[in-house]
């Protein structure tokens, strides 16, 4: 679904909380369009992000850029070996915004190699 679909839902007063997923709605630019539309229409936005990789990192960065503070829907599990290290650790109920280049953290190649399924 794109911003057009969200606009239709908002126009129909069909949702109180919108939960777009950056990996399913067309990327960061489309997510930001939806966020601006939700803000203009007074609809709460809580990004859907049950991921443990780049989709989650992108969502964290976008949520930090939203005009209003928001929650992020997150699948809380403790991974035996996270390819993103501590970048997706929750502390006091919050995910920190990774500060490195790009999405803030490169995956750990050793962990990816160790768990690769050929």
Image (tube, rainbow, N blue to C red):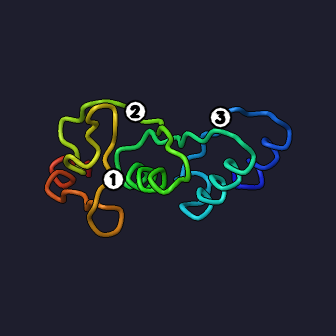
Q: Which residue is mark 2?
A: 75
Q: Secondary structure at mark 2?
A: loop
Of circles 1 and 2, which is in front? 1
Residue drawn at 47 percent across, 42 percent down: 49
Q: Position of residue 48 (x, y in %)?
A: 52, 40
Q: Nearer the viewer, residue 17 or 4?
A: 17
Q: Nearer the viewer, residue 74 or 96?
A: 96
The mark tally for this picture is 3
Q: Secondary structure at mark 3?
A: strand
Query: Residue 95 lies in what quarter of the image?
Result: top left
Q: Position of residue 31 (x, y in %)?
A: 59, 56
Q: Nearer the viewer, residue 50 or 88?
A: 88
Q: Is residue 60 above or below residue 80?
A: below
Q: Which mark is residue 17?
A: 3
In the orientation shown, which residue stands out farthest toward the front?
68
The reply to whether callout 2 and callout 3 are in contact (CB within 8 Å) is: no
Say which label, 1 or 2, has the lower sequence index. 2
Mark 1, other Cα within 10 Å: few <14 / some 14–19 / many ≥20: some
Q: Position of residue 107 (x, y in %)?
A: 25, 58
Of circles 2 and 3, which is in front? 3
């Amino acid at each position: 679904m794109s911003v057009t679909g969200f606009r239709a839902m908002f126009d129909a007063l069909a949702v109180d909380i919108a939960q777009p997923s950056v990996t399913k709605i067309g990327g960061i630019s489309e997510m930001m369009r939806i966020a601006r539309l939700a803000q203009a229409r007074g609809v709460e936005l809580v990004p859907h992000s049950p991921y443990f990789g780049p989709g989650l990192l992108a969502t964290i960065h976008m949520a930090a850029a939203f005009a209003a503070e928001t929650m992020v829907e997150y699948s809380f599990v403790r991974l035996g070996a996270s390819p993103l290290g501590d970048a997706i650790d929750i502390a006091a109920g919050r995910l920190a915004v990774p500060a490195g280049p790009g999405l803030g953290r490169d995956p750990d190649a050793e962990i990816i190699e160790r768990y690769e399924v050929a």
